[in-house]
Amino acid sequence: MPTLDIDSPYIKPNRLRIVQRGINVFIKKWRHRFNDAPSCRSIALKAALYSGGLLAIGGLIWFTVKNHLPFSAHAASGVAPSSPGIATPAEAARQLDVGHLPPYRPQRVEQEGIQRRANINTIIPDRPRMGMVQYTVEAGDSLFGIADKFDLRPETILWGNFDVLQDDPHSLRPGQELNILPIDGTFYEWHEGDSLNAVASFFSVDPQEILGWPGNSLPPYLDLSNPDIVPGTRLVIPSGRREFVSWQAPRISRSNPAVARIAGPGACGSVYDGPVGEGFFIWPTTAPLLSGYNFSSFHPGIDIAGSTGNAVFASASGVVGYAGWNNCGYGYMVVIDHGDGWQTLYGHMSQVNVVCGQAAFQGGVIGGVGSTGNSSGAHLHFEMQHDAYGKVNPFDLVSP
């Protein structure tokens, strides 16, 4: 049986090939220098070069023999000779088994990377609210504060709570339960015989706005004229709006003060005459700051801060057309007609110091700051109205 010679050139062919190729290159280089070198003119010099080349070749041959690297064509080609006792590469491979391998030593490979820590809390991203929620009014709340808390317009709070607030922001009281819509607009409670077309028209929106709101859970194929909606269903009306129900005091002129008789016992019944306004107005109390609502479409006046009993002044000269209690939420109220188309109103007073038909002069004390009627704290509610312009923002005409 052939034996495995570990020094065979067929086991280490690369080393043999490198040495043999080096010898061939060396011979060619010295032959070229011997024949072509222009400086080698003498025979003696050529002979010396030739001798040096032979010595170098002999040294390489000795190195090859010393390291058992046969200088043969078989080694260069990598083809195994058919010599007895020498194993071919295939035979050598068959003689190798697992025992020739080095012993296996298992090693734990540590893979470095980003470690993930377990988090037992599931974080759910914020999602838009689709339905209404309830909010309980707390002490110190205001219509604007509640609206800001839920990122809504103040009108939306009023429109969503007519049964509670009656479109009057001064009706807000601690403990009240308010509907908080998910979006600016209003809501509607469905009644038997209603149609989506009519409801949408009343709130100035397209019927598809109502159908498309996810919180309403309405199928998109509903008959707009006769939809199958259960009576009592509350529908959110995105961007819906309506006219406010006015509980405001009417224009009370000196020529017809009795028009305010339905407003309460403070109404005056006779025709009066007296001073006319100066053409300009003054700030009606001592405190210079607002304490509640500013002028808006649903609040046609300003709420001026103050302590109970602080003086209230006539903003301009005129005749008192209303003096006393008001049933529409103003509490103790005074109205002065200035004879030039203007009227000023002073509400939530703690006391009234004038009577019907009395002449009031600019700067004169007509009462005290209070918190009567629909009021959550001491302040003066101040309104200005003109026959031609209607209710106007007092800040356009007066300043502290």
Image (spheres, rainbow, N blue to C red):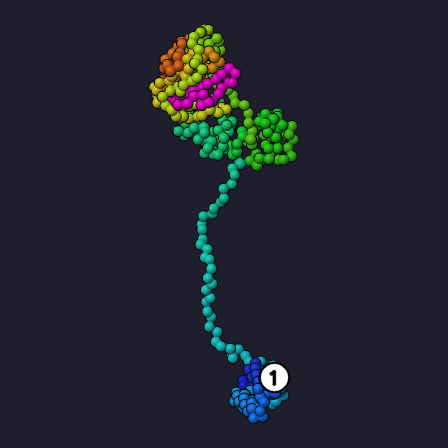
Identify the image quadrant of the N terminus.
Answer: bottom right
Between 10 and 106, the residue placed more toward the observer is 10
Start and end of the magenta stretch? 371-400
**Location of residue 385 with respect to 56 vertically, above or below:** above
Give the image location of residue 168, x and y in percent: 47, 23
**Which quarter of the figure has residue 357?**
top left
Q: Amino acid at mark 1?
A: Ala
Residue found at x 40% / y 19%: 282
Q: Secondary structure at mark 1?
A: helix
Residue 377 visible within the image: no
Residue 213 visible within the image: yes
Identify the image quadrant of the C terminus.
Answer: top left
Give the image location of residue 75, x and y in percent: 60, 85
Give the image location of residue 176, x and y in percent: 44, 27
Residue found at x 46% / y 6%: 271
Which residue matches tag 1?
Answer: 76
Q: Is 377 a magenta residue?
A: yes
